[in-house]
Amino acid sequence: MRGIEFLLGIVLLPLLGCVPVTEFHDPDNRYTPASSFQKEVINYPHIHIASSQLPSEVKVFRNLSYVRYGRRHLQLDIYAPTNAGDSARPAVVLVHGGGWRAGYRQNLAALAIALAERGYVAATISYRLSPEAPYPAAIHDVKAAIRWLRSQAQVYGVDAAKIAVAGTSAGGQIAALTGVTNGLATFDPQASMSAVPSDVQAIVNIDGLSDFTLPEALKYEDDPRKNPSAAGQWFGGRYAEKPYLWREASPIHYVRDGLPPILFIHSSQTRFSLGREQMIEKLQAHAVPYHVEGFAESPHTFWLFDPWLKPTAGIIADFLDQHFYGSLSNPIDRSVH
């Protein structure tokens, strides 16, 4: 049905003259860098919200619709190097976090800018959150964003053969699941309507779960005191009610030969990246390249703040440089002072 809905949206919207809907208004969606700062500054008084002011070295293309379902348009913003010239650059699709039910693509603007300063085209995307659409809608949306970016590669100076997906927190889990399901039609209903693939060539999971079904993960994600929990709202039921969905959404279960390289970046808050070590064991068994980096004494949302923003971008760019170019080009200082 989602594929039919998508196709009807493309065909009928221009004919009907409907006004596009580009935002889903949820009064409970209050997750922003500022709200996170108010929470984290108590324990980390030295932090500052990373600047999203656009430097002269970076240009931005805002509010680009990448997919539509009826009147509903999902949009993204593209940050690109201003000095790219005619050369095509690798791209990174960035998926924000927020417990699958909150957050905004603008939350990752600072990270996108820092990646563009390293020569990457970075796209921050909006996707359908759980109050609007349950799992697996978000996965469908991220794959649609990758497909759209690849289809518009010449317009925005993207190397269509070098596209990575990266995400933070819940967005890290979404990004990982998007990447490890390359080529699986179950997660990509729009594949049958386009010759453009949604596969990615690298995955970056920043403090996101790799396995929902671990007992330690269930303690947090299926907390009976929360009705519903964030994950329970996304899946439409608790683990006991829909265990197949909780398992299906766990990236660890798709490890196989030939997956793209995977980068894990984690905070010192271990609950948010549960399943990583078990997934790494599987990656090793299947000879899938991976790398792990972490920040000691850091909050879960470290990527929103200085002093961690630039080092985070540096780790990502170094990893992609290595796998896309075979070398490190102009690495950023990763030290956190």
Image: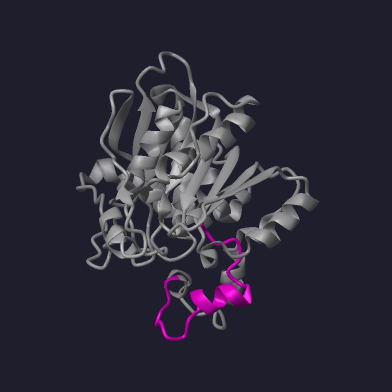
Q: Residue at x 73, y 51 (%)?
A: 283
The residue nearer to you, when weighing 313 against 311, is 311
Question: Residue 33: horizontal and vertical position, in percent?
Answer: 30, 54
Q: Is residue 144 magenta?
A: no
Question: Is any part of residue 12 visible from this angle?
Answer: yes
Outermost residue on the bottom side: it is: 225
Q: Is residue 240 left or right of residue 49?
A: right
Q: Quadrant of the C terminus?
A: top left
Snapshot quadrant of residue 65: top left
Q: Is residue 303 left or right of residue 321?
A: left
Question: Residue 172: horizontal and vertical position, in percent?
Answer: 50, 54
Position above or below: 236 against 322: below
Q: Is residue 222 magenta?
A: yes
What's the image's color scheme?
Answer: one colour
Question: Residue 268: horizontal and vertical position, in percent?
Answer: 51, 60
Q: Residue at x 57, y 54 (%)?
A: 177
Q: Main secondary structure of the magenta part?
A: loop
The region drawn magenta spans 207-230
